[in-house]
Amino acid sequence: MKLPIIAYGDPVLKKKAVDITPEYPNLSELIKNMFDTMYSASGVGLAAPQIGLSIRLFIVDITDRDEPDYQDFKKVFINPVIKEESGELWDFNEGCLSIPDIREDIRRHTNVLISYYDENFEHHEETFTGMAARVIQHEYDHIEGKLFTDKLGPLKRAMIKSKLDAISRGAIKVGYKMKFPSTGKKK
């Protein structure tokens, strides 16, 4: 089932999410719905706060048949904790399903060491690099109550303020279901 994605301006996107247990109600259905929602919006990652749930859960799928490292890169991260960010800082043009039509260069580390549970509540501690590290850091920020726009300088934020306000009001067109904070309406 495709769920509406919460738009910029909703307080749930700025709230630090809480851990869940294996008994979380309908967890496997929630994960399936998150993947359906992400795919319908052509995303590569989705965090639970983006569907209105302030829980420490995010998913990624950066599967790329042409890239050996990402031939089957579909993962679920439950209660993740980033242990270390390392390597060079590199800029990359990022976007976000909660902030449609805005893309900005964001500087992130090339490597990330993360501890997490998968969808079966099996524990993992892994290091990811490159694009995988970037997507994981972006989604992790969501469960920490941070958005990629928070990483922009004051001048850049001022330049996109009217676009952000329009998103919050629902004064945009998107190709997927969204819920806008100022209107309470779904589009």
Image (cartoon, rainbow, N blue to C red):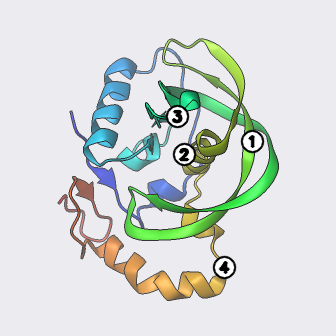
| Rendered position, 89 above or below 125 | below
Q: Position of residue 143 (x, y in %)?
A: 56, 45
- Type of residue at label 2? Glu
Report the Cα–Cα distance between label 4 and label 2: 20 Å
Q: Residues within 10 Å of mark 4 (few under 14, many from 20)?
A: few
Determine whether the residue tagged by mark 3 lies in a helix, strand or loop: loop
| Residue count near mark 1 (Cα–Cα under 10 Å), binned few <14, some 14–19, many ≥20 | many
Cα–Cα gap, marks 4 and 3: 33 Å
Tell me the CA gap for discs 1 and 4: 23 Å
Front: mark 4 or 3: 3
Task: Give residue 20's position: percent from left, percent from top.
Answer: 54, 26
Q: Nearer the viewer, residue 66 or 96?
A: 66
Q: Nearer the viewer, mark 3 or mark 1?
A: 3
Query: Residue 69: where, in percent of width, then height?
Result: 58, 29
Q: Which residue is mark 1?
A: 111
- Image location of residue 88, percent across then percent down: 80, 53
Tell me which residue sits at (20%, 57%) in the image: 175
Image point (56%, 81%), residue name: 157
Q: Earlier in the sequence, mark 4 or mark 3?
A: 3
The mark closer to the camera, 1 or 4, is: 1
Q: Secondary structure at mark 2?
A: helix
Name the residue tied to disc 4.
Answer: 153
Asked whether the residues under the numbered discs 1 and 2 touch, taking CB atoms below 8 Å apart as contact, a structural biologist would say no
Quadrant where the image shows the N terminus: top left
First of labels 4, 2 by sequence position: 2
- Nearer-the-camera pick, 117 or 180: 117
Q: Which residue is mark 3?
A: 67
The part of the image, by quadrant, that contains residue 27 is top left
Asked whether 18 or 124 is in front, the reply is 124
Residue 4 vertical position relative to residue 91 in the rendered view, above or below: above
- Which residue position holds label 2? 139
